[in-house]
């Protein structure tokens, strides 16, 4: 591991404040890459170079002229897994700063270990994200079963379980900036990893959650809490679609269904916290139709009607469906006699060529009602 400029500057800032002394960090070429004195950055530190070349345990600089680019103080090697990865120097009177030497050296090495742990965690998370993306989008388990099983084992993913998929995205009328979206994603990832033992990663258009199958009410509670937290913290409404129950080797199908449930939630404006995909819900069929297809269906149904007749017919058909075809209840709703209801039914049949009293007619007018909502 090498000490990068970013982490070197962070260490200098933290440790300088701690001991109230000027600190320099040099790389393995003896060049100052971070310093409390910004003017010294990028310059060669002769004392550090001597320490590295001669593999010394310390170099004490007693005067500013002793080594090129050096000032009085103490310089110690920074070790990582037994290798020298840099040098840390504390500027000042040696009798004053020597006592800080080993402490600052150890603190620097601990900070490097912490940074390395963060890097490894990020690398592991990216590897998991790539694995799940290949599984979801590219059907890795079908294209390369051996590689799939090996990667799953490496990631400690139990392929014997059934999994569910959720797709999350800001409401269609919202466009959070990149920083806000990153923080929202971070909070979602942290919340669902605890509540649902979920893995989470972002695609270009939405965030994906993958978690072991569990009851819908548990999923709705966990994701509903996440939705409420994001709303209150960022004033950002998120929409959530969840797949139905599915086998582990059909995760790409679960992903597709979660996205469909999300799209349905986006278009329908449902107030429910979570939209669960239901293969038997006709709304999902209609959601897949574009506006032109819907317009064509309605135009064909009411091709001989004026706009006023179409509006009145749809209003009557809606009441008919709500009352399940009961003449008494429809008459009561409209404040008319039953014979008038029969007349309206016959008029609707003549206008459209479809008898709403038949099974097919009921189905057609139910579709037309849904298309206009």
Image: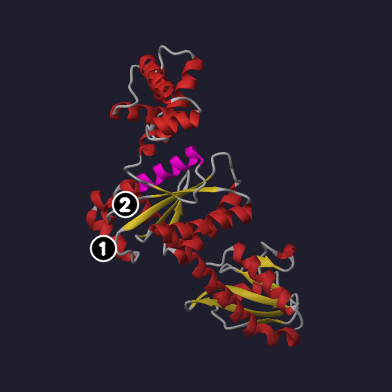
Q: Position of residue 370 (x, y in %)?
A: 43, 32
Q: Position of residue 69 (x, y in %)?
A: 70, 69
Q: Is 121 displayed left or right of 279 in the figure?
A: right
Q: Is residue 263 magenta?
A: yes
Q: Position of residue 363 (x, y in %)?
A: 33, 30
Which residue carries the number 1 mark?
Answer: 160
- Range of magenta residues: 255-269
State the mark number for residue 251: 2
Q: Is residue 157 magenta?
A: no
Which is nearer the eye, 157 or 11?
157
Above/below status of 14 relative to 103: above
Which is nearer the eye, 343 or 284?
343
Q: Is 27 displayed left or right of 252 in the figure?
A: right
Q: Is 355 displayed left or right of 274 in the figure?
A: left
Magenta part, dominant SS: helix
Q: Which circle's residue, 1 or 2, is located before the other in the chain?
A: 1
- Crowd class of label 2 (few under 14; some 14 to 19; many from 20; radius 10 Å): many
Q: Quadrant of residue 360?
A: top left
Which is nearer the eye, 194 or 71?
194
Q: Element under label 1?
A: loop
Coloration of the structure image: secondary structure
Above/below status of 353 relative to 112: above
Which residue: 48% across, 38% down? 268
Which residue: 62% across, 55% down? 232
Which residue: 57% across, 64% down? 4
Q: Element under label 2?
A: helix
Q: Is residue 349 visible?
A: yes
């Amino acid at each position: 591991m090498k000490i990068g400029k970013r982490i070197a500057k962070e260490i200098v800032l933290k440790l300088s404040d701690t001991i109230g002394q000027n600190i320099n960090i040099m790389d393995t070429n003896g060049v100052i890459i971070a310093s409390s004195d910004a003017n010294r950055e990028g310059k060669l530190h002769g004392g550090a170079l001597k320490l590295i070349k001669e593999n010394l345990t310390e170099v004490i600089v007693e005067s500013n002229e002793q080594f090129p680019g050096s000032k009085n103080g103490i310089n110690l090697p920074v070790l990582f897994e037994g290798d020298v990865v840099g040098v840390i120097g504390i500027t000042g009177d040696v009798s004053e700063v020597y006592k800080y030497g080993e402490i600052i050296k150890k603190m620097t090495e601990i900070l490097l270990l912490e940074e390395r742990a963060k890097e490894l965690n990020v690398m592991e998370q990216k590897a998991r994200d790539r694995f799940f993306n290949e599984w979801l989008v590219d059907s890795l388990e079908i294209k390369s079963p051996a590689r799939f099983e090996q990667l799953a084992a490496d990631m400690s993913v139990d392929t014997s379980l059934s999994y569910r998929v959720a797709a999350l995205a800001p409401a269609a009328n919202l466009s959070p900036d990149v920083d806000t979206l990153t923080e929202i994603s971070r909070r979602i990832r942290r919340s669902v990893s605890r509540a649902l033992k979920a893995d989470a990663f972002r695609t270009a258009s939405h965030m994906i959650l993958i978690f072991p199958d569990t009851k819908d009410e548990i999923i709705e509670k966990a994701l509903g809490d996440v939705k409420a937290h994001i709303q209150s913290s960022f004033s950002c409404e998120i929409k959530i679609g969840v797949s139905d129950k599915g086998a582990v080797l059909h995760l790409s199908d679960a992903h597709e269904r979660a996205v469909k449930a999300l799209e349905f939630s986006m278009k329908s404006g449902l107030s429910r916290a979570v939209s669960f995909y239901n293969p038997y819900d006709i709304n999902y069929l209609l959601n897949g139709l574009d506006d032109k297809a819907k317009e064509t269906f309605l135009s064909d149904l009411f091709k001989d009607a004026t706009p006023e007749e179409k509006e009145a017919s749809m209003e009557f058909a809606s009441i008919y469906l709500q009352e399940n075809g009961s003449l008494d209840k429809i008459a009561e709703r409209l404040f008319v006699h039953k014979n008038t209801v029969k007349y309206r039914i016959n008029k609707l049949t003549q206008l459209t060529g479809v008898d709403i009293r038949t099974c097919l007619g009921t189905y057609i007018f139910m579709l037309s009602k849904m298309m206009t909502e």
